[in-house]
Amino acid sequence: MTGLTATILLLLWLSVSSVIEATSGNEPFVDSLTMAGREEVKDELRNTLTRAIELLGSPYAMADEDDIPPLPPPIISVPPRNSRTRPIAMGASVGLGGPSSSRPSMMTIGAGGPAASSSSVDSPFSSSSERTGLGSASYTAARALRSVRSQAEQRLNFAPYQRRAGKASSKPLQFTFFCLLNREADRVPTTKVMKLMLLDAGAGEKSVTMSPSLNAKELRDQIVSSYPLLAEGGGFELLRCVQNSRELEVIPYNFTTTPRYLKAYVGGGKVYIRPLQRDLSVPVATAVGDVKEKCLKCQELILLPLLKEHMTSCREERLIDLEAMLSKSYSSIEDVIADFDIILSRSDMPVTVSRDRIIEDSFQLIEAHPHKLPSRLLISFAGEEGCDAGGLSAEYWTLLATSLKDKYFDGEQHCVVRKNAYSVLHNEFLKIGRLFSLGIASGFSFPFLAHCVYDYLCGWNPVDIEFEIECVPSSVVKEKIKKINDSENLEEFHEAIEGSMDIIAESGYTKPLLNLKIEEKEDLVHTLLMYFCLLISKAELDQMKDGLQYLNLCTYMSRHTELFKPLFSAPEIDLTADILLSLLTVNFTDDDDLERDAYEYFKRYLKDCEDIGIVPLQNVLLYFSGYKYLPVFGFQFSPTLTFHEETYPMASTCALSLVIPKKHTDYVNFRLAMDKAMVYHGGYGKT
């Protein structure tokens, strides 16, 4: 360290007001410049060095370093600590003439020893012959100042923090690595069990000590030597955990080339290792080598750690079986649904839903658990006790079908899809199609669609589909189409057209209307029905078709159209009192006249429901079975009718049992009790 550099550091101290430490025989140093920003420090350093050169009066202050010829090193004397010299104030001039100089000075700088001649600081040099004495000192100071400035700027550019220049430490660096097995892992493993399993597999967390002098290849070789599993991963990348999160981010490659750079980037945090091209295989531990579990698809016993991998290949075999199923010929819908047991061969999935939020809960089920479906649903209703033995599932699918029909379809029995652009935007009809396919595979039906809608879902061309005027959802449009269809002569035909110009224009019918003949009436009516029953909601129907294909149901429907029609279309035979009575097996107690009287009241009550009653027959069926329509596949066992001494009836949808009161001595009270139960029950089978 030269006295000239000491002068420069002193000027730096005066500029940035930092602490200077100077002892006899030791060099001064600037302890810290990190309180200001990097750019501010660099700017102030440049200004200080420029001011120092101007004070020294060098004509080479702005010259290039290559233009300055080399000179012998200056001789610098530093006064002792107890010297009475006073510090130089900011902006004061610096004396360079030695002891005889008249200006106050802390240091004497000369190029030729103590006898060097002095010169005025304010006088610049004009020739190279004058580069002696003060000129040489000023020249040398300018050269040294620019060299120090260049070195300081480099340190600011390439060091994370301004720190004291010194020899790089060779102390080994300690890292904590964590090796992941999955090339798609993007979160930090959290559970202790998972961490222990990774550690047993040769991955997980390890401490590794590295020399800071390693290059990029040596660094990666040492990581592989610590985790031999990485050799089969096709390369790996290093990651760190995002602050205040469990997500991982990739460390830039430039900071993974040496241990020193890597340590500067992660500090004391963990370094996560993730394979690039292939997931790392986990060797089966001997401790669990004998533990096997039965595959629910193929019924084979598989080692527990290998079961998940087996499920993938087993699923592929099932897909092959599905192709064979699609090519089969079926004589009844029961045979088709029996084959769906292959698709629903996973374990049952418990689901809790709210009766008030049946649609929202069902949509969330489809979105949140796509990997767990298809599965048979074990239903429980929020806030209600009960174990699903079949009855709760029937209630769920019936309630869901009714809710979907009221919200997304138009009509009573022969419904068409309601136009709903918002639902299409949020893929709600896709979810409806998936729920339909899952319900049908589970043995339930949705028999409320119009025949034209079902035919379109089966893949028919709309031109070939037959339409019914009753399926038109709008009553105004329906009346206009009826008037056109009922016209018997050309005059009535054109009169009907004149009153329907708005709906004809909306449908896109482009023939000249004034020239239409009566023979073209059928073509016009078919166009209007096709538009208002199908094409107006084509986007909704197409999205629903995609959802039905979730279990290849559309493919089944296109190949077995007539077999599947009862599952979607309204039944041709309406429910009657006699049909409902024929479903029930009555259990009388011997010689109990009250029971027989109650049974007669019950038959009369069903007749009233069929004719003028405030409760439709479907509600009675729903009350004891959970079905609003007669199930296409029938009941698992025959429903029963029994009697009790209570005021109101009771029912069990799982047991398919209806219990009616026998305490009423007249039909009026019996009917009031039954009506209250059917209308105000708190859930099917509850009063």
Image (tube, grey):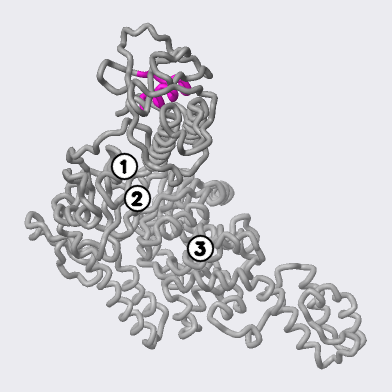
Q: Quadrant of residue 184?
A: bottom left
- Disc 3 or 1, which lies upstream in sequence? 1
Q: Which of the two residues, 291 or 382, is positioned nearer the viewer here?
A: 291
Residue contact between numbered discs 3 and 1, judged by CB atoms under 8 Å: no
Q: Which of the two residues, 239 or 557, is positioned nearer the viewer here?
A: 239
Q: Is residue 206 above or below residue 49?
A: below
User: Does residue 617 appear in this view?
Assistant: no
Mark 3: give few (<14), some (14-19) or many (20+) Cα within 10 Å: many
Q: Residue at x 63, y 68 (%)?
A: 417
Disc 1 residue type (three-letter): Val
Q: Which residue is mark 2?
A: 251
Q: Residue at x 34, y 52 (%)?
A: 254
Q: Is residue 145 above or below residue 632?
A: above
Q: Is residue 41 above or below residue 186?
A: above
Q: Which residues are magenta?
A: 5-20
Labelled disc at residue 431: 3
Q: Quadrant of residue 19?
A: top left
User: Does residue 64 appear in this view?
Assistant: yes
Whole-number angstrom distance, CA of label 3 to CA of label 1 = 45 Å
Whole-percent x, y for residue 636 in the image: 36, 67
